[in-house]
């Protein structure tokens, strides 16, 4: 095995198979339908919002669906797709061939990133269609509110969808890290949701520790911020107002931030899986 060189092609083949397996899962279809239904159904809440605020409400529903259902899909798919290989013993057949464990983990990670990309692309496309359609209707009904033209920045919506994908990719890497050493699928799912909560709320803990008088608390806050990513940075483009569009440098820094954490978590998953007895 050590004589066989590392092959990105084999990793991509595993990624392709992972994407196909995810597409066959009922849970993927259920979560996707629920997310799509929430985005479409938000149009019928128009009694609560009129004019431009209604468009912000629709966008918030779409971003919320991507966040909630996307996280549930990413964590559950990571656990199911990884442990199905272990429980069905297909991983033994795969690793008996000239396939590195590194290629297996990398392929799984890329496949999960592709699953998250498909999910975010579908919801972003649907959200843009819903916003465009409703904004066109509102422009006809309330022309005074749209004297300067359209008020929705669809570039921001696209960026928000892309940032959501980056966040889910980071989450997939951390969930895969847990799966690489966990013994059960349930533990991986629970740990994945715990990581999700920590990443969304760690900035609050960090602020509390920094403001506190204890040196130990400040060190703990900094350590927490270093180990876990801050998912609040991925809300950079959640505003649909053209004036609130983030700069290219801001988006690039967030992308580097996400890819850095994803690469680190994936590398740790490779290290852990190489030590694991199957």
Image (cartoon, rainbow, N blue to C red):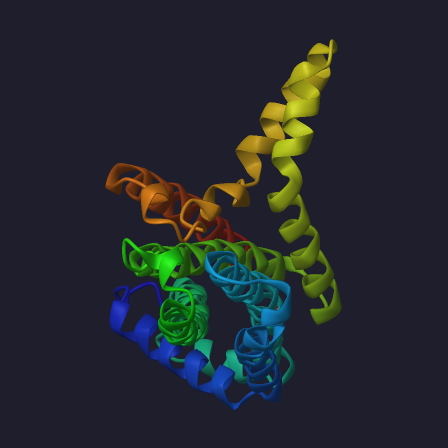
Residue at x 60%, y 66% (from the top left corner): 75
How far from the left and from the top, in percent, is residue 169? 45, 59
Q: Is residue 91 above or below residue 181?
A: below
Using the image, determine if residue 82 lies above or below residue 2: below
Q: Nearer the viewer, residue 226 or 34?
A: 34
Q: Is residue 68 visible?
A: yes
Please state the horizontal and vertical placement of residue 176, each as a whole percent of the image. Answer: 55, 61
Q: Position of residue 185 (x, y in %)?
A: 70, 70
The x and y percentages for residue 266 are 46, 54
Quadrant of the image for the N terminus? bottom left
Quarter-of-image position of residue 248: top left
Location of residue 65 with respect to 21 vertically, above or below: above
Q: How many marks?
A: 0
Q: Is residue 195 left or right of residue 121?
A: right
- Residue 256 in sight in this render: no
Locate the C terminus by quadrant: bottom right
In this view of the protein, which residue sits in the foreground, 33 or 77?
A: 33
Left or right? Give the position of 126 relative to 74: left
Which is more toward the observer, 169 or 140? 140
Left or right of residue 50, residue 163 in this image: left
Left or right: 89 with respect to 160? right
Residue farthest along the front direction in this orientation: 144
Which quadrant of the view contains residue 96?
Answer: bottom left
């Amino acid at each position: 095995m050590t004589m066989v060189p590392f092959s990105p092609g084999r990793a991509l083949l595993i990624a392709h198979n992972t994407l196909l397996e995810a597409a066959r899962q009922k849970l993927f279809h259920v979560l996707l339908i629920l997310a799509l239904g929430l985005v479409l159904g938000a149009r019928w809440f128009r009694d609560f919002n009129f004019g431009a605020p209604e468009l912000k409400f629709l966008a918030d529903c779409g971003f919320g669906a991507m966040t909630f259902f996307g996280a549930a899909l990413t964590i559950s798919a990571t656990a199911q797709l990884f442990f199905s290989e272990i429980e069905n013993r297909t991983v033994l057949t795969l690793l008996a061939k000239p396939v590195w464990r590194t290629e297996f983990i990398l392929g799984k990670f890329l496949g999960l990133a592709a699953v998250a990309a498909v999910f975010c692309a579908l919801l972003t496309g649907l959200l843009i269609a819903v916003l465009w359609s409703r904004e066109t209707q509102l422009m006809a009904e309330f022309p005074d509110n749209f004297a300067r033209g359209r008020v929705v920045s669809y570039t921001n919506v696209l960026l928000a969808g892309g940032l959501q994908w980056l966040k889910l990719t980071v989450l997939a890497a951390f969930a895969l890290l847990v799966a690489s050493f966990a013994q059960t699928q349930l533990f991986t799912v629970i740990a994945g949701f715990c990581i999700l909560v920590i990443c969304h709320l760690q900035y609050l803990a960090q602020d509390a520790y920094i403001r506190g008088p204890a040196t130990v608390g400040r060190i703990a806050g900094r350590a927490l911020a270093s180990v876990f990513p801050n998912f609040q940075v991925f809300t950079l483009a959640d505003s649909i107002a053209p004036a609130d569009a983030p700069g290219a440098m801001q988006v690039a820094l967030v992308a580097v931030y996400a890819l850095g954490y994803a690469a680190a978590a994936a590398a740790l998953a490779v290290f852990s899986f190489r030590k694991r007895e199957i």
